Amino acid sequence: MASAASRAVDRRFRLAGFSERDSLVVRSMVRLLAGRTRDRWSVVDADPVHLVIVPVGFTGELPPGAAAMNVALPLRADDLWSQLDRVSGQLALDEGMLRPGRADNGDVRPVAAGPGRRLQLLRWPPDALLGSDLRYLRLATMLGARPFAIDELAAKSNIPLATCHAFAAVLHANGVAQWLIDPDDPHGDADGNTGLFSRIRSKLGLEGPR
Amino acid sequence: MNQEHRILFTGTIGVGKSTAVSSLLGAPLVSEAVDGGGVPVAVDHGDVVLDNGDRLRLYGTPGQRRFEPTWRALADGAMGLVVLVDHARPAPLADLAIYLENFLDLIARTGCVIGVGRMHAGHEPGLDAFADVAARHGVVCPVVPVDVRDRAQVLSLVDLLLVQLESRGG
């Protein structure tokens, strides 16, 4: 897996809506995570910034163009770490920074996300990327089963498209997924055993496919 | 005619295969004789009768390697696999490798979830090490901690298995 440090980008963030004490805690924790997060994060007091970190429930105004990240208190380092890396992935996607990769035969393929492109999971993602978020667990499970276009992934999982894009970018940035250009999707119209799976879900009290 | 569908729970002896199935179904398991290379082997299972009369049969495979012929017999026609790993054993990564190797055909054909039990925070190997073992076997599947006594957690394993099967179109 490629190291995070080799691609690190300098990013600026500021805080909004925290008490002075909580601000200190958040700043300290981000500083402690330096060298582990995908990007290098520096706290600043004024815009422009890449990211505004706010507490859960914050209702104030946010600067245009900046990503917002809600954090729950008390703060957990692993949550903060995985959220920062997810934001980095989304920013990289927005900035068109995704790099080309290599196919098995050595040919370079264009790999940026886009229409007609499907994401393939190469291995199960590191636990730090998934955290305890069941949405990411489900998305990774689907991508492990077969490559998905992101809009199809969002539709079948019933998870917001933006979340799917951000997660895809993080997977790609961490070297555990690759984009495929393959106009023929052999699974696109597959109905398979959906009746059987629905019956099993119904009997066990599991929600249907989302 | 009603059909029988089979999901296998495999792993080392004492890992909690029968406990997992029993937790899930809320009922004790029954034993059935399965071919073990010319010798009948008693295997535990629990059943769920589906709305159309089909039967979902959840098997706990016998744990020891000497039962490999029984594993193969159970894997034939199964719809998916749950591998349970006991983190408290001396070599849990090697344990996982044994079950991945033996069920590789089934995994490639269907789906697999790896549940790691008896994990304690900070104790190595972490979940990523188990995912590494899976990757070395060409297996990309969920690797999650599990307490097999907790029905919700066992149900979550089955849910993830179904998500894979649904994604592949069955």
Image (tube, grey):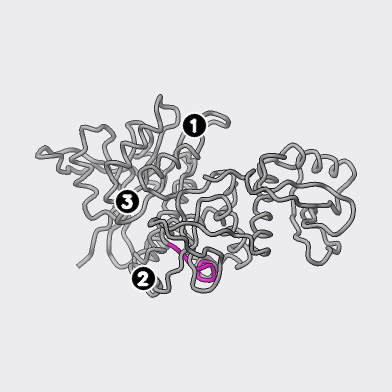
Residue at image point 53% right, 53% down: A137
Residue A90 left/right relative to B119: right
* Residues beneath discs 2 and 1 located on the same chain: no
Q: Position of residue A80 (x, y in %)?
A: 70, 46
Picture disc at residue B107: 3
Which residues are the magenta region? Answer: A147-153
Q: Which of marks 1 and 3 is nearer the N terminus?
A: 3
Mark 1, other Cα within 10 Å: few <14 / some 14–19 / many ≥20: few
**Which label lies toward us, 2 or 3?**
2
In the picture of the structure, the residue carrying the numbered disc 2 is A186
Quadrant location of the N terminus of chain B in the rendered image: bottom left
In the picture of the structure, the residue carrying the numbered disc 1 is B125
Q: Is mark 3 on a helix, strand or loop?
A: helix
Q: Where is residue A47 in the image (x, y as percent from the top left)?
A: 87, 58
The residue lying toward the viewer, choosing from B82 and A111, is A111
Mark 2, other Cα within 10 Å: few <14 / some 14–19 / many ≥20: few
The residue lying toward the viewer, choosing from A185 and A53, is A185
Does the magenta segment cover residue A100?
A: no
The amino acid sitting under disc 1 is: Pro
Residue at image point 77% right, 54% down: A56
